[in-house]
């Protein structure tokens, strides 16, 4: 498949901008329409805040569509905010997508347990707030919906796992026109898997500094700025 990553992500940024602009308008209307019946300040301002944040984030992405960290921030805040605002299903999906972006950026390659715990703290606090605000019955109904969604995702994975796992070093080099040596293939495959430079160096029997310098050259050859942009290209090829 021919790849033009920046164009595809720009289209995503445009779509996100249009969608969040519409959501922002709705949240402004709701803010004034429901302010008499929803006195709780947290709930009243949450929808307005998360939609404004998401809209500003997508505006930024129009100018730099491959900035994966911005996607992480948008969907993380949107996810936590929706949980506070009782939108558990949308909030869960946004948090899941935020975690997926972080994973493909290699964020969890080191100290993954600590980072996972820190990642989970705000959503957990939002769930605790929701439990006391909505009551146990509504909370557990939403929680069961999330569990059902997880089960559905697992079934999707079982159906398509062979296609997911069929990716290899040869697929990777083919996606970038196959202009790489055997060493290039190994380094790019390791980067695509989110491995640390230290681990790659040990596997290949070379120094970590050699791996870093070689990867910098490969990124330049591919026309990307860093590992995050490379992963964006690789995982959407």
Image: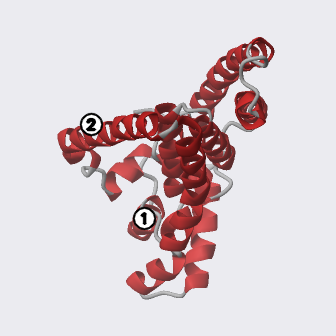
Residue 81 showing in the rendered view: yes
Residue 55 showing in the rendered view: no
Which mark, by number, is residue 166?
A: none
Q: Where is residue 176 in the image (x, y as percent from the top left)?
A: 47, 46
Cα–Cα gap, marks 2 and 1: 41 Å
Residue annotated with mark 1: 181
Which mark, by number, is residue 152?
A: 2
Name the one closer to the observer, 7 or 89.
Answer: 89
**Of helix, strand and loop, which one carries label 1?**
loop
Comparing labels 2 and 1, the label whose residue is closer to the camera:
2
- Quadrant where the C terminus is found in the figure: top left
Left or right: where 76 falls relative to 151:
right
Q: In this view, does 181 lie above or below 152?
A: below
Q: Residues within 10 Å of mark 2 (few under 14, many from 20)?
A: few
Q: Which residue is drawn at 57% across and 39% down?
A: 83
Left or right: where 34 falls relative to 205:
right
Q: Residue at x 39, y 52 (%)?
A: 172
Q: Where is residue 199 in the image (x, y as percent from the top left)?
A: 45, 80
Q: Quadrant of residue 136?
A: top left
Q: Quadrant of residue 36?
A: top right
Sequence-wise first label, 2 or 1: 2
Name the one closer to the observer, 47 or 76.
Answer: 47
Rendered image coloring scheme = secondary structure
**Of helix, strand and loop, which one carries label 2?**
helix
Q: Where is residue 15 in the image (x, y as percent from the top left)?
A: 62, 20
Q: In this view, does 212 lie above or below 80?
A: below
Q: Which residue is drawn at 41% across and 36% down?
A: 137
Q: Is residue 97 above or below residue 32?
A: below
Name the one closer to the observer, 139 or 177.
Answer: 139
Q: Residues within 10 Å of mark 1 (few under 14, many from 20)?
A: few
């Amino acid at each position: 498949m021919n790849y033009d990553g920046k164009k595809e992500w720009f289209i995503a940024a445009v779509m996100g901008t249009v969608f969040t602009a519409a959501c922002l308008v709705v949240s402004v209307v709701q803010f004034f329409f429901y302010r008499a019946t929803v006195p709780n300040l947290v709930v009243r301002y949450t929808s307005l805040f998360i939609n404004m944040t998401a809209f500003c984030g997508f505006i930024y992405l129009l100018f730099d569509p491959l900035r994966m960290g911005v996607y992480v921030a948008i969907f993380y805040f949107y996810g936590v905010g929706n949980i506070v605002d009782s939108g558990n299903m949308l909030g869960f999906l946004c948090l899941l997508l935020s975690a997926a972006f972080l994973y493909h950026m290699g964020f969890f390659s080191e100290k993954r347990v600590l980072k996972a715990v820190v990642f989970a703290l705000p959503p957990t606090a939002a769930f605790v707030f929701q439990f006391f605000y909505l009551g146990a019955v509504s909370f557990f109904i939403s929680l069961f919906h999330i569990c059902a969604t997880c089960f559905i995702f697992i079934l999707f994975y079982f159906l398509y796992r062979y296609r997911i796992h069929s990716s290899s070093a040869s697929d990777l080099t083919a996606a970038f026109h196959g202009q790489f040596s055997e060493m290039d293939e190994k380094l790019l495959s390791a980067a695509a898997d989110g491995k640390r430079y230290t681990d790659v160096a040990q596997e290949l029997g070379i120094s970590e500094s050699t791996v870093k310098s070689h990867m910098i050259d490969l990124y330049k050859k591919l026309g990307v700025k860093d590992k995050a942009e490379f992963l964006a290209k690789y995982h959407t090829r």
